[in-house]
Image (tube, rainbow, N blue to C red):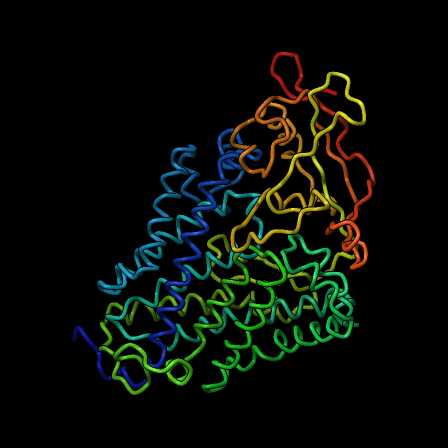
Amino acid sequence: MPEQLGWLDGWWASADYDVAREVLQRGVGALLCLAFLQALGQFRPLLGEHGLLPVPRFTARVAFRDAPSLFHLRYSDRLLVVVGGLGVGGGAAIVVGLPQAGPWWVTTAVLLVLWAGYLSVVSVGQRFYAFGWETLLCELAFLAAWFGSPAVPVPFLLVLAARWLLFRLELGAGLIKWRGDPAWRDLTALDYHHETQPMPGPLSWHAHHLPRWWHRAEVVGNHVTQLLVPWLLWLPQPLPSVAGGVVVLTQGWLVLTGNFAWLNWAAIVLGAAMVSDDVWRALVGGLAPGAGSGAVPPPVPVPYLVTATLVVLLLAALSVRPALNLASRHQKMNANFEPLRLVNAYGAFGSVTRRRDEVILEGTLADRPGPDDWREYAFRGKPGDVGRRPPQVAPYHLRLDWVLWFVPLGASGPWIPRLCERLLEADPATLRLLRLDPFDGARPRWVRMRLFRYRYTTRDERRRSGDWWVRRELEVIVEPVRLSPRPGGGLAR
């Protein structure tokens, strides 16, 4: 068998997506580097041996086939640090292009190792990793791996696979909105969203106070971008490039007005990867030598031809259920249909929250606390102090802050009393997840959890008070608890 099949260059291989490959792989490498870095900082207090939802308890009751992970073999906080450190290093190597300088299989192997490592983290991450962008990053990493290196041409079949991913991401989000909440159909969704989204950003207050006609225009623009523009991906160039550019621009607006971890940035990477080399040349001028449709792609090695084709056939077979999900009246949002998370369903904000309720955690050093003895714990991202401007935290993902947003919506669990217990113990790892410990490392005698209704200040209220929020108490959702003096510990009232 010949080592190279040059006769495939005209149809299987493409010379118009060399820049797209660089954008996709280096962008995914940056996202993986960030994701593993977050795991190093947050995984152990949330999911480690003494975390709020310990991994060993999870792996004891959930089979490997349902949650494939290296940590099924053995979990330790030290092993997590090793996996996280290798992930950060591997992601950074992809960003600077070290694996891409070698044969195609080196880049593929590095990205597959990163995919397997992050899948291992996500599979055991439970509530703290139950976000659509975790699955999206797993799928992106697996797909990017098979683009190989500049030593081989870009297979047009993989270009189509990347378009299929962006198509599902955008159309799935558009359909779940249209089918879900009537506020998206009557164009009122953005009257609420900037105020009630899980993690507002520095410009969210200003976006909320834009005129109502602007909010209507935002919703119409969302529908056009997510329900109509994705279909351009299946037409000849330059229309897929136009679709990718629209995604980049609209996701940029979401970056400015909210904090959605790396979801928007992953979509921006995908959108930019839709742009052909010819369009890049028209936009920014000279590209690297060899980039563009006028260049002759390198020959196709037989092992790469066979491997990439088989991968695309696998992805096509796994796409049946996600495709049916898009067409279903009972569409699932952010769902995976097989444990390796290779082809998934996406969507966001199928329903819009009309009111903002926030969980506030408090503690006290007093044995018999009065109303003025309680001190509030401050979180890094979620609203608390009404005078604090919402910060910019994305693409960093504050997992505890996000999960607390879901508590008023009914998403409780055993991690809540464990969080109270860790605060009572003044656990250093848990306290590092917060912005401010009001007791400077001392153990409080009691902690409690209260629920407040938040809304943005009006322009007049902000001028008078300087505050960004107004809040009022609704109820105490966890009555004051303390560490039990009985053997075995636990909480007591």
Q: Is residue 141 left or right of residue 152?
A: right
**Residue closest to the eye, 295 or 434:** 434
**Residue displayed at 36% across by 39% down:** 82
**Residue displayed at 70% across by 30% down:** 375
> Vertical placement of 166 versus 193: above or below?
below
Q: Is residue 181 left or right of residue 104?
A: right
In x, y percent, where is residue 301? 22, 72
**Residue closest to the eye, 430 or 296:** 430
The residue positioned farthest toward the front in the image shown: 464
**Residue displayed at 57% across by 62% down:** 255
In x, y percent, where is residue 89? 33, 49
Exactly how many numbered labels are in the figure? 0
In x, y percent, where is residue 312? 40, 69
**Residue displayed at 41% across by 75% down:** 159
Picture quadrant where residue 141 is located: bottom left
Tell me the quadrant of the picture where the N terminus can be found: bottom left
In x, y percent, where is residue 342? 46, 60
The residue positioned farthest toward the left in the image shown: 2
Q: Is residue 395 left or right of residue 452?
A: left
Tell me the quadrant of the picture where the C terminus can be found: top right
